[in-house]
Amino acid sequence: WESAIALANMIAAHPEAIQGKQILELGCGVGLSGVVAQALGGIITQTDHEPRALRLSAHNAAANDVGGLSQFQADWRNWQHAAQYDLILGADILYERAVHPLLAAIFARSLAPGGEIWLADPGRPHTLDFLSALEDGGWRGRIDVVTTADASGRTGKAPVDVTLARLRKSDGR
């Protein structure tokens, strides 16, 4: 997905924010963002609801000689994971409004004090609504739009504008 490419590029541009940090990747998909973060010295835990996605991500990490990734299958509707992380990553996870309250609850529970969330989304209108709601809840940071080449591999496809958000709770959380 274009969002994963944009997020991986943001991670690569900020290795100092990754090195030695405990990082949770929500909805890892093929694992691009987490694999890049692990290669840059992050301590990555990847999650996905689909076991096939976790297997594909592990395969991609191994194919790129990146070891040490932790993984677990997760259901955002029944989040039981108690660990906290310095950074939470999510590429293309804001796909429907129904998941927004679930993600906000995971951020509140799983982000360590002073931590950040980095999100990437392919310009869906409701993404800005979610980011605005986070801002109303005390989250502050930076939102950018970057243009990323179409990831489908089909000739003639237009580039995609990806919204990138880098946020932290204003109370230091």
Image: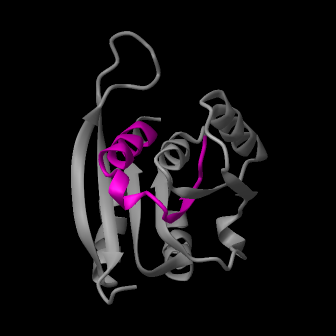
* Residue 11 in the image: above or below residue 30: below
Tell me where residue 158 appears, x and y as whole percent. 29, 22
Give the residues in magenta. 4-29
When the figure is inspected, residue 39 is found, relative to residue 96, above or below; the finding is above
Q: Is residue 102 left or right of residue 48?
A: left
Q: Nearer the viewer, residue 52 or 172?
A: 172
* Above-or-below relation of 41 to 30: below
Front residue of 94 and 5: 5
* Residue at (51, 56) in percent of width and height: 42
Q: Position of residue 97 (x, y in %)?
A: 47, 62
Residue 94 makes an appearance in the image: no
Residue at the spot 33% in from the left edge and 47% down from the top edge: 10
Residue 124 magenta: no
| x and y percentages locating residue 59 in the rendered image | 71, 33
Where does the C terminus fall, quadrant-wise?
A: bottom left
Residue placed furthest toward the bottom:
171
Question: Residue shown at 75%/40% (left/top)?
Answer: 55
Is residue 115 visible to us here?
A: yes
97 or 91, which lies in front? 91
Report whether 84 appears left or right of 136. right
The answer to if 8 sits in the magenta stretch is yes
Q: Position of residue 73 (x, y in %)?
A: 75, 57
Please say if 125 is above or below 101.
above
Q: How many marks?
A: 0
Residue sitting at x 47%, y 35%: 1
